[in-house]
Amino acid sequence: MEHSAAKKRILLVTLFAAAFRLLCAQQPGAGDRTPIPGAGANTLEAREEFRLGIQAYNRYAFNEAILSFERALSYRPGEAMILEWLGRSYYRSGMEEIALAQWRAAGQAYGWSSGPGVLLGSMMETVSNRRSFLPVEDDGIRYVESGRYPGLSDGTVLFRQPTAVLPMDDGSVWIVAYGSNEIVRIDVNGVIHDRSRGPVNGFDRPYDLVKGPGDTMYLSEYRGGRVSVLNSRGEWQFYIGTRGRGEGQFVGPQNLAVDEEGYLYVVDYGNRRISKFDPSGAFILSFGKRDGIFQGFLSPTGIAVRDGRVYVADGALKRIVVFDRNGSYTGDLADGFSGPESLRFLRDGRLLAADTNRVLLIDTDTAIVRELGAAGNSRVRITGADMDRNGNVLAANFDAGEVSILTRLDDMASGLFVQIERVSVEQFPRVTVELRVEDRLRRPVTGLQALNFLITEGGREAAGQTLLESGYLQTSSDIAILAERSAVTAALRDDIAAAARDIAAALGPDQRILSFVSAEDQPRRERLDPLNPRVLEAAARGSGTYGPRWRFDLALRLAASDLLAGAKKRAVIFITSGTPGELAFERYGLSALAAYMANNGIIFNAAVIGGGSPAEEIRYLCRETGGKAVSLYRPEGIGELAGNLASVPNGSYVLGYETSLSTDFGRAYLPVEAEVYLMERSGRDGIIYFPPME
């Protein structure tokens, strides 16, 4: 069943196609399919180098492509299309300032009001204005309502009285429908994919839903006086607790939270307490009654747990109080709320709180409270809020019977950043297009479906368009291990080997170590055999020298380049003493290394050995690519650096279509354009490619 926004998309596709035809009618080559028009020896040489550059680009050989395009420019200086492709190659190579300079020259040559000039201008604005690669949510930007998932559409009831939302890794969201006794899973277009009403006797006023360990979810049932344990597909497994006032029993259970060790915390509203259960569902303890220090709950609502602290909102006291994991009261976090309800921790450690008609962001270290946004409906009671994988805040509006979608104000104005990354013609006339979809701050946009894409050729809708792959759905991932070969790590070979073993042990069935690079004075690839642990051990210990002149920048580029043609989910794991070394950035600067990985969807993680701390440069690369730096010696180890790759958001997509354009025996260059639409936002890109020579 479709949400009205999904229906609206069908109409808008037609409008976008018409607009795209007008735009692309100005594209060089839409009628004349001769690249670099003109005659003479220089033109012929430029065309050949241009073709070689595009072929190198599609092989991910960006440095080779840069050389070919530079040579093409030497024959035809100022040629717009060569400049555009030179800029694309520099961008993918991480050299964004040089890319912007090439695009600026290309835009002037095209004319900024032309079709390609407009596309280049939009691309340049996005790249120029990005302030960071993966921003924190608290940067002062206000969130505004960009859409809704209504419970009633065209007279059909989709769900009633939502109380909570649970965003999933694939961009979809589970909505807890208190009024219709069910949970429903809705994709980014508002289309319902799953609906669960529980076991034979059904759910009895479900209220909150959270992720548990492994494949489990926990669902509180307010009137049922219990917690249902579900799998990730919403299928019921068993109950925790019963109705009553004894230990492990509930009267009106509401909000839920799960800590890092898998323990479940339940707000037992009717008994005015918090109950804690172990991962198997066994009762541990309850707390929150009046004692000599804490006055006791009056109306406990939201709950969240992080770093050994339990945060509980009280709607009557209008404040958030703090306990340790054993239930001992440690103080108040903040007060002065209107009617606080749900609490959810974001990935950056800040607390998202639903407070009557608004959503708040709270820094638990400073107790600073900031309003992110508010729901615009005249009937508002936000009982639950969370942030989805695309950076939107989803707010369950109980009174209006809908879920409001709040988006950053600047994201609404800037739209989506779409880049066609590769065109494959191996099965010509079947053409395959790989593209990446991000927001203006480089965050991947996940959860897109076939109806979110429109492929055109010179403004005409392409035939047989099919969505072939979605990166966010892939369970496969590739890893390149990079080992520091410094004088310091020469004494830590056993630790390097232990880190490599831990990484290998954490790999799932669809994950692989694609390469192992030693960061020496001349970086080298070590021999690998996925079926032989001894070979991995030998690679970890190294076959070359350790010394002070090891090169971090060259080794990192080599390791990252090994990943380009592999799985869409990919990461470099750097085994390090914590420093990039004295010669770290002689060839490639820190920002260029970060951009090279970020622009190609590569995460940088660091496993620190020897008891040191990661240098700021290492932290920067982790932060800017969505990775993290952890110590080998911590109790939980470093396995998450590899094991968590499957759940990392990914904005890559692969589409196929049948071209109907004439190839001129392989000499013509053919245009392809991609339009992406999501809710009220859109983005597009257009490039050219060469068909096979006939």
Image (tube, grey):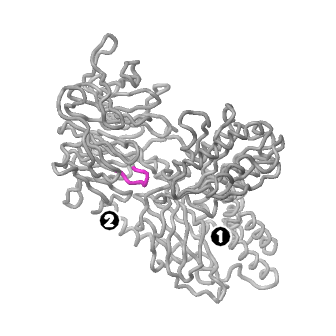
- Which circle marks residue 58 in the picture? 1
Is 667 placed above or below 214 here?
A: below
Which of the 4 quarters of the picture holds residue 673?
A: bottom right
Q: Which residue is mark 2?
A: 7
Callout 1: SS: helix
Disc 1 packing (10 Å; few <14; some 14–19; many ≥20): some
Instruction: Please report contact status of discs 1 and 2: CB closer than 8 Å, yes or no.
Output: no
Q: Most extreme residue toward the top, as rendered? A: 292
Residue 81 placed where, x, y %? 68, 72
Q: Residue at 45% across / 39% down in the picture?
A: 346
Is 186 placed above or below 333 here?
A: below
Q: Nearer the viewer, residue 475 or 127?
A: 475
Q: Nearer the viewer, residue 39 or 286?
A: 286
- Which circle marks residue 531 in the picture? none
Q: Residue at 68% across / 79% down in the picture?
A: 35
Give the mark, 1 or 2, whose residue is nearer the N terminus: 2
Residue 490 placed where, x, y %? 78, 39
Label 1 to label 2: alpha-carbon separation: 36 Å
Amino acid type assigned to the residue bearing label 1 in the image: Asn
Whether residue 372 is visible? yes
Disc 2 packing (10 Å; few <14; some 14–19; many ≥20): few
Mark nearer the viewer, 1 or 2: 1
Q: Which residues are magenta?
A: 168-173
Residue 268 placed where, x, y %? 25, 30
Magenta residues, dominant SS class: loop
Does the magenta run of residues contain 395? no
Q: Nearer the viewer, residue 141 or 636?
A: 636
Which of the 4 quarters of the picture holds residue 302?
A: top left
Which of the 4 quarters of the picture holds residue 8?
A: bottom left
Residue 87 is left or right of residue 175, and the answer is right
Residue 636 is left or right of residue 191, and the answer is right
